[in-house]
Image (tube, coloured by chain):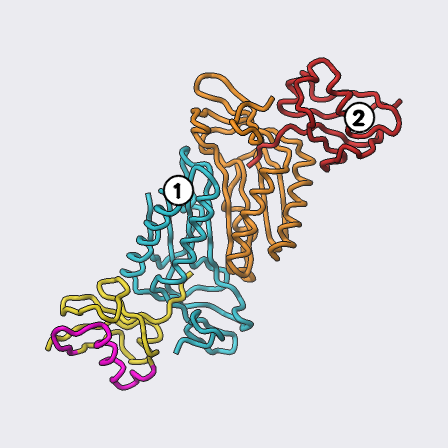
Chain colours: A orange, B cyan, C red, D yellow
Amino acid sequence: MNRVAVVTRAIDPASLIAEVQSPQVGAISLFVGTVRETNDGRSVTGIDYSAYIAMAESEMTDILSEAGDHFGVGSIVVEHRVGVLALGDVSVAIAAAHAHREPAMACTRFVIDEIKKRVPIWKREHYVDGTSEWVDPTRENRAPAL
Amino acid sequence: MNRVAVVTRAIDPASLIAEVQSPQVGAISLFVGTVRETNDGRSVTGIDYSAYIAMAESEMTDILSEAGDHFGVGSIVVEHRVGVLALGDVSVAIAAAHAHREPAMACTRFVIDEIKKRVPIWKREHYVDGTSEWVDPTRENRAPAL
Amino acid sequence: MSTVTVQLFASYAEVFGAPKLEIALDPGSTVADLVRRIQSLPSGELLPPSPRVSVNRKFASPDKLIGSADEIALIPPVAGG
Amino acid sequence: MSTVTVQLFASYAEVFGAPKLEIALDPGSTVADLVRRIQSLPSGELLPPSPRVSVNRKFASPDKLIGSADEIALIPPVAGG
């Protein structure tokens, strides 16, 4: 079964693995996104994630459904965290299980790529110089959103 | 840092994640292989894994070194279990961490593909009918090895 | 005339200094009409030319008709993951 | 003549009913020579025509020379993962 959630607590990747694991599957692929100390050459101290939660969960549910159709994967779990995250904190985790490794791995990649394109979640990065900016991946030069 | 091990105890994927996680990375890719209850249409009860341990660890070390060169990933950990495994047990886990997600995911895929090609590890599958066979992935029809 | 509530998030909420806007629309208005109305508000010129809009939690095309019962939001460039 | 020890694993160990073989080789023998010697043993005909051989924990080509101090193994089709 699939499950999506936007959460405000720490994400435990091991619990996602356990959730998709079963004797029916032979391969589990997990992707974990974490807060990195540098981004585009700037030193980051932390990230505030915010979301339009109802739509984010709806959109992630659609993505898992599409992934199921594309790759035949019936067991995918996604959690995305919002709120104030520190360096090294897990922001997102995706686990997918399948009889074989190729569909499991392709599924995980598809889901993270789609999340980054279309799930209404935003992040404000805080830098060591005391400034902060909304991250806008659509801008070539990564200038702040707006 | 990279690490490889052939182990005789249960593999804990979470410990591999923790091992590669750091504020320098933004993405962690994990692959987990587990014992599946059916293989090529036959009902499996368990698998005995055996290895030429010294060469297996040497070969896996070479694979991680090649992966590091190909994908610029400097933090990869692999554990492969040997001995008697039950349904659902984890046989192999690979964790790779990188600043960005593409190299981390490509690295994990490369490592599992290479392990399956060239690391001297064997498995004897046991079936519900009481028979057992050495698995030979090089045979088209998946007949038993020898 | 009917009034719709438009939810704002992240950088767009900062532009208008509020988490939502109340916008009066003529019957038969589309997403494009709504966007033009919002861009004509004070600070509205800070929005991009074609910001994404969601209607009932789905991304909506500019020609989609808007009803007063719809759940509407203006969606800044997303940065999840 | 010198004697080398050849480690056997998995299905190959079952073929010969032993975890290793002691094979006497002429000086200057290659991996291909060793394989021919092993295939001429009882049950050796059950091996594939060109089984993989490792020398000092690396897969070795048929023309590689073998010394008595080398760590040698016959490698059945691998099935890890």
Q: Residues within 10 Å of mark 2 (few under 14, many from 20)?
A: some
Q: Secondary structure at mark 2?
A: helix
A62 on left or right of A14: right
Q: Secondary structure at mark 1?
A: helix
Please give the chain letter of the residue carrying mark 1: B
Residue B10 image position (x, y, % from top left): 41, 56
Camera sees residue A83: no
The stretch in magenta equals D24-46
x 40%, y 54%: residue: B111
Q: Which residue is mark 2?
A: C33
- Above or below, B110 against B131 in this view is above
Residue B145 image position (x, y, % from top left): 40, 75
Marks 1 & 2 on one chain: no
D78 on left or right of C47: left
Question: Residue D28, labelled with which disc?
Answer: none
At label 1, the amino acid type is: Val
D72 on left or right of B48: left
Please give the chain letter of the residue carrying mark 2: C
Question: In the rendered view of the protein, which quadrant contains the N terminus of chain B?
Answer: top left
Query: Which residue occupies the extreme bottom position in the image?
Result: D42
x 71%, y 36%: residue: C59
At label 2, the amino acid type is: Asp
Q: Which residue is mark 1?
A: B20
Say which of marks 1 and 2 sits in front.
2
x 27%, y 82%: residue: D39
x 76%, y 22%: residue: C36
